[in-house]
Structure formats: C-alpha cells, structure tokens
Amino acid sequence: MEIRLKVRNWGSGRGVLLPKKLLEELKVQPGDMLAGEVRDGQLVLTRAPRYRLRDLLKELQPENQHDVSAEVEEEVEP
C-alpha cells in the first residue's frame, strides 16, 4: 500500500495524520507506541515492543540480580 501524507502544523511542531485504513491494516490502536528511525533518508516506523512485568521477571536470573537493600539507608512507610 503506497500512501502520501501531508506534513501539517500541529501546535508548535509539525506532524502527519495516519489514515484509518492504514492503521487498521497495521492493527495499530490508540495508545500503541511506535518507534521511528531514519534509514537511508527514509522514515521507518515500527511497532515499539510492549513489555509486561511478569514476562520480564521470567527472564530474571540469579546472576543478574543485585541486592538493593544495602543501598537503602532507611525504610520509608507509604
């Protein structure tokens, strides 16, 4: 799908509006994060990874943990 987007003033910056059809095809929802980079003079957008705490904790291994209790001088009650 080839699309052309017009750059418009948006507040104190500039932006483009992504058409609904494109968003539906990419399955992008409000609140989703996109990552962008410039490659060979072209803007490339990709879906930014979404991390869930429980998935990150599954990857936690004893050798990459550290004891932060030594760094805390006193406990603070909420």
Image: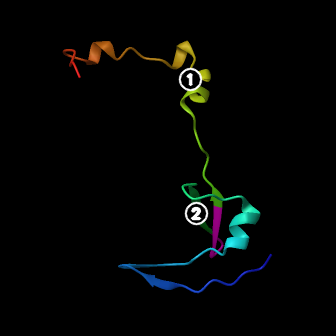
**Dot 1 corresponds to which residue?**
57
Residue found farthest to the right: 1
Q: In the rendered image, which quarter contains the C terminus?
A: top left
- Residue 15, image x, y percentages: 50, 77
Q: Left or right? Give the position of 41 relative to 10.
A: right
- Where disc 1 sits, the SS reads helix
Residue 18, above or below 53: below
4, 67: nearer the viewer? 4
Amino acid on which the number 2 mark rests in the picture? Gly
Tell me the quarter of the picture where residue 73 sits: top left
- Residue 24, image x, y percentages: 72, 64
Residue 59, above or below 24: above
Amino acid on which the number 1 mark rests in the picture? Leu
Q: Residue at x 66, y 73 (%)?
A: 40
Tell me the quarter of the picture where residue 13 sits: bottom left
- Residue 69, image x, y percentages: 31, 13
Q: Nearer the viewer, mark 1 or mark 2?
A: 1
**Dot 2 corresponds to which residue?**
36
Q: Left or right? Give the position of 31 relative to 25.
A: left
Q: Main secondary structure of the magenta part?
A: strand
In the rendered structure, does residue 40 fall within the stretch colored magenta? yes
In the rendered structure, does residue 30 fall within the stretch colored magenta? no
